[in-house]
Amino acid sequence: MPLTGAQSILKKLLPGKIFRFVYNLASGCYVLWVKTLDELYYFFAHIYYLLANDRERLAKIKRIKKIRKYSMVGRTGLFRTHDIAAAMEKEKVDGCFVECGVARGGCSALMALVAADHDSNRKLWLFDSFEGLSEPTAEDEYQESLRYKPGNRSSDLVAPGYCLGTYEEVESLLFSNLGLSRDNIALVKGWFQDTLPEFRRKTGPIAVLRIDGDWYESTRCCLENLYDNVVSGGSVIIDDYESYVGAKKATDEFIESRSIKTELSFDGRGGCYFTKP
C-alpha cells in the first residue's frame, strides 16, 4: 500500500487496535481500487490486441487472466514474471523454473502456462510450507531510517499464517483447472530450511528462480541454497524486495557477500529481478 510515510505517523499517533482498523480499511479500499483498474486494463488490452492481431501479447493477456484471481501479485509483477519466463523460452536458456513461496499458485501457474505453450517440456519445482508465512525475526522489523526508501514495510502488518494456499488448492489449479501435465511439475511441501538443502541437488540447473518468502530468513535461505543452480543468463526474481525490509536486507547482503556484479531492475509494485552474470 502507498503512503508509507503517513502509515508511520499514524502508527505512532494511534492506539494499536485503531491503527490496525484504519490500516485494514485503507488496505481493503486500495486493493479494491487496484483490482478495478486491473480488470479494466485486461478488458481493453484484450480487445486492443485482438483487433491489432497481436497474437503474442494477446496470448500473454489470456494467460494472465486465467491465473490472476489466484495471485496476490499485482499486474506489473505478473507481467514481469511472464516476460522473464517467456524470454527464457525464446532464448532457449537451459534449466527449470523454480518458485519458493507458492501461496495459491498464481505465479507458478503462469510460468507453467508459458512453458506449456512453448512446448519446452521444462520442469517446474514449486516449494511452499502450504501453512502460510513463518515467524518473522528481528531482521524483519520496521526501520525508521527506511521510511522513504525501499524495504519500509513493517513486519507487523502481516503475520504468521498469512499468504496461505493449500497443497490441494494449488494442485487443483494446476492439474484440474488448467490441465497441465503432472510429469513436468513437482510440488514440495515443507519449510524452506527443511526442503531446499535436499532438493537443490534434484532441481538441477535453474533458468528462473522466483522467491516470494517475504521474510529475511526465508529469502536468504532460498538464495543460499538455490542461487548456485541458476545458470548464467538465468533470472532471479525477489517478489518482496521493495516491500519488506527483511527481503531487501537478505538480498543485498547475499549479493554483496558473493560479489555478484549485476544490476537490479524493478517491476513497479515492490519486486526486483536481476540476471545472473
Image: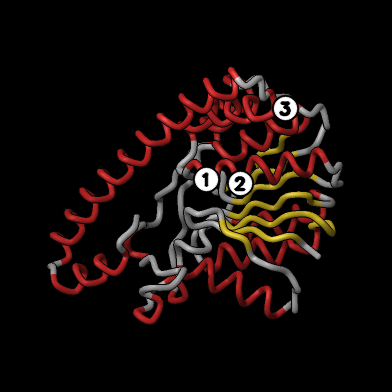
**206 displayed left or right of 71:** right
Q: Earlier in the sequence, mark 2 or mark 3?
A: 2
Q: Is residue 244 left or right of residue 186?
A: left
- Nearest the camera: 247 or 170? 247
Residue drawn 83% across the image and 32% down it: 120
Judge the density around disc 2: few (<14), some (14-19), many (≥20) Cα neighbours within 10 Å: some
Residue 182 is tagged as: 3
Q: Position of residue 202 (x, y in %)?
A: 81, 49
The nearer-to-camera label among 3 and 1 is: 1
Quarter of the N terminus within the rendering: bottom left
Q: How many numbered callouts?
A: 3
Looking at the image, which residue is at 55% across and 37% down?
105
Q: In x, y percent, where is residue 199?
A: 75, 52
SS for callout 3:
helix
Q: Position of residue 265 (x, y in %)?
A: 62, 61
- Residue 76 is labelled as 1
* Image coords of residue 33 (percent x, y): 31, 40
Cα distance in 3D space between marks 3 and 1? 28 Å
User: Are the residues at dot 3 and dot 1 in contact (C-beta closer than 8 Å)?
Assistant: no
List the residue tagged with mark 2.
80
The image quadrant that residue 259 belongs to is: bottom right
